[in-house]
Image (cartoon, rainbow, N blue to C red):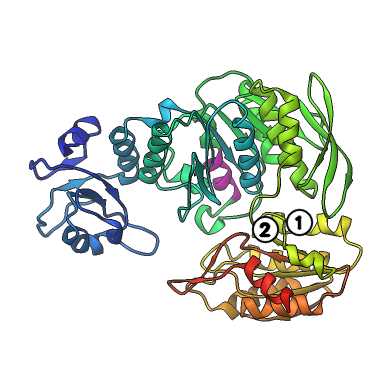
């Protein structure tokens, strides 16, 4: 496509070079530029994209988008966009032929539960035709799967992905929508067929600063629903923020809950370390389900998917079969197989917020006959205020805690652990501090007796650890398997 076509579709604030060029794609990272890509040199939290313009041009970038006109001349056309993220979304959508308009897209947003709810909805969608999934665990459609570095990819990556889904005959898509994506315009050019809101608890305050800002970012998704039909927005009204959404967006919302009376409810009958049993109540019927997903929070996730299916007109006998047969998605309350052989229950979970860690530990407290050993840390260069909160939660709900590194990034790992320890010291629980994550997992498995539960929390199915500016190969699941073999 010619650059002039993009310019005509969404004009820049200023355009200093009239030379027309061929555009083959877009890039926001200089090392990912290939010949013909438009490079967006944006100012970020840690770096200024202008510092990488020379590298992008040397890689044959077709043009460069900047927020202010450069003082020095460059060989590629220079385009000034005061809102480059908006331009990236607009141009990407136009470049790939507006793929979102050819798909029925469901957005799942909230702090916790997005991945499990999206995974269940994806399986339900398959009852009617080909579907696609985009989220923290990656993308999955047709015979393709892969992963981006973000829950919701950058706008140009997302539009390319949706375009490829269209080319592969995909009809429906479910995607996790992060608050960052909503705030930074990654889904600017996507209108949703329906939206599910799971909950809102403390996270990402390093970016949003306050919970109200975080909430306002989440609210943006509801203005992007295609119609005002009831049930297009499904909200958890056991959550205080969910109730506020229902009050604001009442005409399009349907509600679900375990505690409060709602359009859709779940009556919990029993929970074990291997399964959960509950009765699903809708305006039309009741159904009893046994599911492999354990814990109260997973009953919420199942309830959200079941309610979404009723609102979407799916055959509920088939839907209940899907939900009952669904296995945990990788890294979400996932059992380490060799744990059972050793007489221990070993679980890997992504819980990395105070609320998520509390939910997982409360679930295990309900079903564990022995002790709970909890291994966890907190990510570096992220919300520091949640560290002592998570330390206190672990100390109150586990019998033994092992603090260890998560993804320290550019921070001193021991500094992060000291922040967590502040909250842990408020409890009487025995604990250890072992910065090396592999050593910490091995230690925790060694001290666990038969009948105990070992929870390895924070990273889920991630296969790396971010230390400094490097990604080091690392898997909680593989590490636990290795030590259990011994």
Seen in the picture, residue 366 relative to 280 is either above or below; the reply is below
List the residue tagged with mark 1.
360
Observer-nearest residue: 261 or 332? 332
What residue lies at 24% left-to-right and 60% top-to-bottom? 50
Observer-nearest residue: 128 or 239? 128
Say if the magenta span includes residue 228: no
In x, y percent, where is residue 297?
75, 47
Disc 2 packing (10 Å; few <14; some 14–19; many ≥20): many
Observer-nearest residue: 431 or 247? 431
List the residue tagged with mark 2.
351
Seen in the picture, residue 368 relative to 323 is either above or below; the reply is below
The answer to whether mark 2 and mark 1 are in CB contact below 8 A is yes
Mark 2 vs mark 1: which is more N-terminal? 2
Residue 388 found in image quarter: bottom right
Magenta region: 211-218
What residue lies at 31% left-to-right and 53% top-to-bottom? 28
Q: In this view, does 274 lie to the left or right of 223?
A: right
Disc 1 packing (10 Å; few <14; some 14–19; many ≥20): many
Most common secondary structure along the magenta stretch? helix
Q: Is residue 75 left or right of residue 48?
A: left
In x, y percent, where is residue 8?
19, 31
Callout count: 2
């Amino acid at each position: 496509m010619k650059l002039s076509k993009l310019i005509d579709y969404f004009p820049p604030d200023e355009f200093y070079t009239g030379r027309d060029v061929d555009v083959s794609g877009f890039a926001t990272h200089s090392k990912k530029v290939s010949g013909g890509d438009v490079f967006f040199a944006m100012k970020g939290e840690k770096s200024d994209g202008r510092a990488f313009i020379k590298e992008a041009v040397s890689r044959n970038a077709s043009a460069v988008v900047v927020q202010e006109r450069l003082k020095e001349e460059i060989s590629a056309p220079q385009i000034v966009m005061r809102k480059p993220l908006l331009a990236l979304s607009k141009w990407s959508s136009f470049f790939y032929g507006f793929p979102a308009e050819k798909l029925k897209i469901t957005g799942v947003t909230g702090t916790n539960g997005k991945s499990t709810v999206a995974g269940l909805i994806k399986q339900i969608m398959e009852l009617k035709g080909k579907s696609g999934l985009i989220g923290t665990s990656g993308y999955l459609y047709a015979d393709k799967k892969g992963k981006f570095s973000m829950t919701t990819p950058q706008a140009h990556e997302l539009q390319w992905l949706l375009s490829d889904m269209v080319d592969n005959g995909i009809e429906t898509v479910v995607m996790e929508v992060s608050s960052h994506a909503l705030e930074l315009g990654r889904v600017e050019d996507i209108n949703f067929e329906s939206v599910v809101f799971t909950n809102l608890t403390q996270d990402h305050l390093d970016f949003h600063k306050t919970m109200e800002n975080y909430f306002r970012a989440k609210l943006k998704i509801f203005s992007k629903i295609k119609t005002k039909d009831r049930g297009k927005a499904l909200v958890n009204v056991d959550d205080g923020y969910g109730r506020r959404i229902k009050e604001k967006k009442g005409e399009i919302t349907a509600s679900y809950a375990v505690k409060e009376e709602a359009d859709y409810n779940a009556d919990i009958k029993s929970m074990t370390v291997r399964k959960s049993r509950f009765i699903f109540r809708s305006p039309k019927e009741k159904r009893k389900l046994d599911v492999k997903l354990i814990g109260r929070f997973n009953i919420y996730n199942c309830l959200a998917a079941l309610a979404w299916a009723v609102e979407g007109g799916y055959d509920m006998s088939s839907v209940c079969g899907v939900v009952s047969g669904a296995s945990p998605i990788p890294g979400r309350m996932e059992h380490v197989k060799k744990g059972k052989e050793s007489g221990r229950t070993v679980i890997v979970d992504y819980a990395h917020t105070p609320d998520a860690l509390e939910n997982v530990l409360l679930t295990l407290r309900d079903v564990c006959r022995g002790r709970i050993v909890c291994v966890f840390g907190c990510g570096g260069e992220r919300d520091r205020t949640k560290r002592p909160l998570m330390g206190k939660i672990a100390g109150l709900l586990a019998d033994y805690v092992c603090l260890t590194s998560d993804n320290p990034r550019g921070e001193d790992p021991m500094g992060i652990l000291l922040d967590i320890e502040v909250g842990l010291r408020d409890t009487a629980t025995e604990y250890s501090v072992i910065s090396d994550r592999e050593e910490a997992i091995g230690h925790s498995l060694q001290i666990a007796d038969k009948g105990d539960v070992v929870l390895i929390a924070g990273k889920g199915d991630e296969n790396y650890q971010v230390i400094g500016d490097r990604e080091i190969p690392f898997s909680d699941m593989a590490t636990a398997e290795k030590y259990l073999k011994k």
